[in-house]
């Protein structure tokens, strides 16, 4: 696996690694490590909904696929600390239509990610948005844009978005403005089926 993209994400190509990550607890573990940094299985356990021993097993399983690794030890060296190997991760279904294993694994991981994040906007609207000050509230929300483009054009759009995001994603924490805060940008890229291309374009 590599992380040669602008955002520093690890690129998962091994179907076995995709299947390993397609699990609610493992996705929760990786989310926590991405957001809060190195921690122990015991500290992770309450947030990921598993016991410390089960969390530790999942961490070792993720490590076997190169998704997490040992971090610098804590002051108590008996406590094993873990960290994510990259800022984020990405994966794609294989281009080869005969690669059923890869396509199935990518679909499984996609479905688990959709399930994990499906209620996030609703929880944000109920719990976070009411407490935002007007400047942040004005910039928040969602957009639902439909475009009619080719696959090559969609790749160009995605590349352009990442080019804009990269300097902010990868900059050192010391260079962040004093009023900076975490912002989750969720991008659902959902090409429509062929049957939806007929009729009037909206």
Image: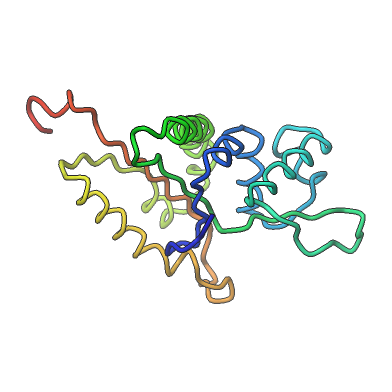
> Where residue 45 appears, x then y in whole percent?
77, 39
Is residue 129 positioned above or below 77 on the image? Answer: above
Nearest the viewer among 128 and 12 is 12
Is residue 155 positioned above or below 104 on the image? Answer: below
Labels in figure, total: 0
The quadrant in which residue 92 appears is top left
> Where residue 175 appears, x then y in whole percent?
53, 76
Q: Which quadrant would the C terminus be assigned to in this image?
A: top left
Is residue 13 positioned above or below 168 on the image? Answer: above
Nearest the viewer among 28 and 127 is 28
Furthest toward the bottom, the residue is 175
Residue at 42% over, 30% down = 100
Furthest toward the front, the residue is 98
Specify whether residue 122 is in view. no
Specify whether residue 152 is in view. yes
Q: Which quadrant would the N terminus be assigned to in this image?
A: bottom right
> Where residue 139 appears, x then y in whole percent?
37, 53
Residue at 92% over, 59% down = 76
> Where residue 20 appears, x then y in whole percent?
61, 37
The quadrant in which residue 148 appears is top left
Residue at 64% over, 52% down = 66
Residue at 22% over, 45% down = 151
65 lies left or right of 109 = right
């Amino acid at each position: 696996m590599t992380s040669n993209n602008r955002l520093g994400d690890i690129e998962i190509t091994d179907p076995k690694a995709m299947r390993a990550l397609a699990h609610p607890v493992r996705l929760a573990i990786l989310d926590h490590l991405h957001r809060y940094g190195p921690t122990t299985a015991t500290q992770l356990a309450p947030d990921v909904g598993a016991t410390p021993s089960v969390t530790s097993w999942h961490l070792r399983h993720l490590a076997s696929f190169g998704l997490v690794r040992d971090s610098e030890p804590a002051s108590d060296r008996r406590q094993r600390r873990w960290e994510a190997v990259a800022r984020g991760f990405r994966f794609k279904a294989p281009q080869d239509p005969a690669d059923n294993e890869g396509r199935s694994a990518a679909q499984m991981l996609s479905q688990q990610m959709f399930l994990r994040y499906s209620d996030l906007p609703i929880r944000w609207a109920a719990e976070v948005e009411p407490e935002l000050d007007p400047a942040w509230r004005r910039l928040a929300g969602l957009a639902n844009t439909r475009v009619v483009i080719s696959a090559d054009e969609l790749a160009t759009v995605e590349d352009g978005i990442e080019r804009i995001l990269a300097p902010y994603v990868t900059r050192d924490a010391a260079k962040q403005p004093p009023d900076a805060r975490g912002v989750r940008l969720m991008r659902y890229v959902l090409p429509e089926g062929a049957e939806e291309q007929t009729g009037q374009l909206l």
